[in-house]
Amino acid sequence: MRKTTLLLSVAVAATLPLPSLAQQAQQSVVTSPGKGTITETVKVTATVEAIDKAKRTVTLKGASGKSETITVGPEARNFDQVKVGDKVTVEYVQALSLELKKASGQKAEVTAASGAVRAEPGQKPGGAVGAKVTAITDVVDLDPARQVVVLKGPQGNLVDLKVRDPEQFKLVKKGDQVQVTYTEAMAVSVTPAK
């Protein structure tokens, strides 16, 4: 678990400067009575402009013409196969889902899972990482004037949740529970230059 969490952290940290290169960002919201999910996907495709193998850095140039230099950690296999002119595609997805649990009586808790896949030795560099955190929270208060539900998490922390849909707000009662699930995943692939 610790190793995959480390891989996820490193992979996400490596892409932090990439938003300036982003070409496609999509967001979707799906709701049904007592449920809602918001998903955001960002896709970046860039061309390898320069490589410093000693420092393990790659300079990537996006379609907008902007360039970013990122450091590639030692856990990324086959770094030596990356060449100037190769295309690097990074796709990052994050989703937040909420589901109303009518006075289920479950204990407030948090569970987490993560996983990673990386290229085998000799293959083109690439891989994917993902993580999922689920929390059962208690509805401890409601503010109908502001349409705010107050959730109490497993560690006792309170979170105000604004419910924009009046019909969804009407479904929630003090004593209910809300299952919150946060998921994130990232995939990286390298396509050789033609």
Image (spheres, grey):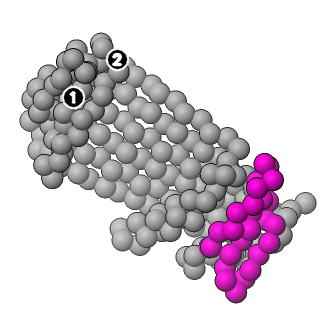
Residue in the picture at 50% in, 68% down: 10
Can you say which quadrant of the picture contains the N terminus? bottom left
Q: Residues within 10 Å of mark 1 (few under 14, many from 20)?
A: many
* Residue bearing mark 2: 165
Residue in the picture at 14% in, 45% down: 108
Disc on the earlier residue, 1 or 2 = 1
Left or right: 23 in relation to 74: right
Can you say which quadrant of the picture contains the C terminus? bottom right
Left or right: 134 in relation to 130: left
Near-viewer residue (172 or 179): 172
Query: Which portion, as a residue range, is magenta?
Result: 47-72
Q: How many marks?
A: 2
- Label 1 element class: strand
Q: Position of residue 83 (x, y in %)?
A: 81, 72
Near-viewer residue (122 or 71): 71
Which numbered tag is attached to residue 149?
A: 1
Q: Position of residue 61 (x, y in %)?
A: 78, 59
Residue in the picture at 15% in, 32% down: 139
Q: Position of residue 2 (x, y in %)?
A: 36, 71
Q: Amino acid at mark 1?
A: Val
Most extreme residue toward the front is 145
Vertical order, 3 against 40 (above or below): below
Q: Does the rendering let one see residue 27?
A: yes
In which quadrant of the rendered view does residue 126 lie? bottom right
Would residue 49 be counted in the magenta stretch? yes
